[in-house]
Image (cartoon, grey):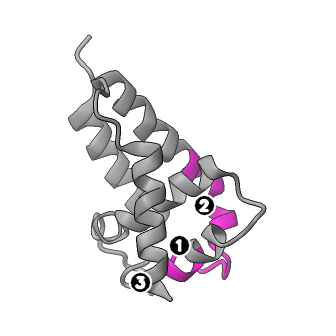
Amino acid sequence: MDEQYEKETESEFEKHWLKTEESDESVYQDIRQIRDYARLAFDKLDLDSNGFIERQELFTFLASDKVSSREKSFITFLLNNQQAIADMTAESTPGPRSGISRSDLESYFGLIINLIQPAG
């Protein structure tokens, strides 16, 4: 089941995020939108309220008919980058090792946004 979702989410990601002639400003804005979505939707995505967004929770939302295609593209980004995001901070509280915490999100997006921020 995960393999099928992987293929579908990869296709969804490519459709929404991989563009051939994308400017730095556009990529910067897209990443900020994903960050803002993750911040606002964290509690909704954390179905078991343990303080971590886990892979299965993200898959649950991808399978939902009630989630817009734009939200699914954000969730797909989180899925595709879940391990890198989860590895951003060492949690002192118990939780899933591969789950994404609020601290992980802030650290990850802070780093990425600083790296791709357009000059200006």
Q: CA distance from mark 3 to mark 2?
A: 25 Å
Name the kind of residue labelled 3 in the image: Glu
Q: Considering only order in the chain, which callout, 1 or 2, is on the residue closer to the N terminus?
A: 2
Asked if the stretch drawn in magenta spans residue 49, the answer is yes
- On screen, residue 12 versus residue 89, left or right, reads right
User: Which residue is denoted by mark 3 in the rendering?
Assistant: 3
Q: CA distance from mark 3 to mark 1?
A: 20 Å
Residue 80: x, y in percent? Answer: 37, 65
Label 3: few (<14), some (14–19) or many (≥20) C-alpha neighbours in 10 Å:
few
- Label 2 close to label 1 by CB (< 8 Å): yes
Can residue 32 be seen here? The reply is yes
Residue 42: x, y in percent? Answer: 60, 60
**Callout 1: helix, strand or loop?**
loop
Above or below for 63 versus 27 = below
Q: Considering only order in the chain, which callout, 2 or 3, is on the residue closer to the N terminus?
A: 3
User: Which residue is denoted by mark 2 in the rendering?
Assistant: 42
Can residue 95 be seen here? The reply is no
- Residues rendered magenta in the picture: 37-57
Q: Considering only order in the chain, which callout, 1 or 3, is on the residue closer to the N terminus?
A: 3
Name the kind of residue labelled 1 in the image: Ile
User: Which residue is denoted by mark 1 in the rendering?
Assistant: 53
Name the kind of residue labelled 2 in the image: Phe
